[in-house]
Image (cartoon, grey):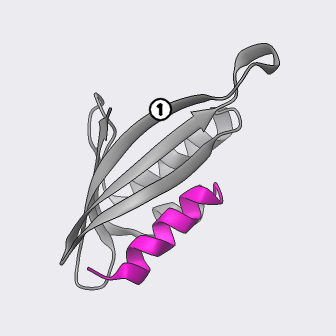
């Protein structure tokens, strides 16, 4: 696996740069959030990220660990959004199984929630 390719998308998510994150996906990639229908193709993934960015409150993505080698890895992460009325941030733990191609572009991102 290209550590640089995976590191690039994780950095983009951490910076909340969803345009840069979408650019890390292969043209025919699949993005699967837990319990949702898959989104297929870089253009559809970019459109999904753009809709999220336009509608979402502040958020954080923190990659806690990357396990794997070759062309697959598991990314253990926490996704957080602020609590209402100034309350504490709400966190959701999860992991994503990621498959990359030989250029380091993401072929599949499949999330599982803990």
Total of numbered circles in the picture? 1
Q: Give the quarter of the image for residue 16.
A: bottom right
- In the image, residue 77 sits, relative to residue 102, either above or below, namely above
Say which residue label 1 marks: 92
Q: Residue at x 57, y 64 (%)?
A: 12
Q: Which residues are magenta?
A: 1-16
Q: Residue at x 69, y 21 (%)?
A: 83
Residue 14 counted in the magenta span: yes
- Considering every residue shown, the one lying at the far top of the view is 85
Q: Nearer the viewer, residue 111 or 91?
A: 91
Q: Secondary structure at mark 1?
A: strand
Q: Residue at x 30, y 85 (%)?
A: 103
| Image quadrant in which the N terminus is located | bottom left
Where residue 27 appears, x then y in whole percent? 32, 68
- In the image, residue 64 sits, relative to residue 36, either above or below, namely below
- Considering every residue shown, the one lying at the far right of the view is 86
Q: Nearer the viewer, residue 55 or 71?
A: 71
Left or right: where does residue 98 sit relative to residue 61? left
Q: Residues within 10 Å of mark 1 (few under 14, many from 20)?
A: few
Q: Residue at x 31, y 50 (%)?
A: 96
Left or right: where does residue 17 sit relative to residue 5? right
Residue 7 counted in the magenta span: yes
Left or right: where does residue 110 sit relative to residue 91? left
Where residue 20 appears, x then y in whole percent? 56, 67
Where residue 45 appears, x then y in whole percent? 41, 52
- In the image, residue 29 sits, relative to residue 83, either above or below, namely below
Q: Main secondary structure of the magenta part?
A: helix
- In the image, residue 84 sits, relative to residue 91, either above or below, namely above
Q: Nearer the viewer, residue 106 or 28?
A: 106
| Image quadrant in which the C terminus is located | top left
């Amino acid at each position: 696996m290209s550590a640089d390719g995976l590191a690039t998308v994780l950095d983009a998510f951490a910076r909340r740069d969803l345009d840069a994150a979408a650019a890390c996906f292969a043209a025919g990639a699949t993005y699967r959030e837990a319990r949702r229908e898959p989104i297929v193709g870089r253009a559809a993934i970019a459109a999904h990220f753009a809709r999220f960015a336009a509608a979402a409150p502040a958020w954080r993505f923190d990659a806690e660990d990357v396990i794997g080698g070759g062309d697959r890895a598991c990314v253990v992460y926490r996704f957080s959004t602020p609590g209402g009325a100034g309350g504490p941030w709400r966190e959701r733990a999860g992991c994503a199984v990621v498959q990359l191609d030989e250029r380091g572009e993401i072929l599949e991102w499949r999330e599982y929630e803990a």
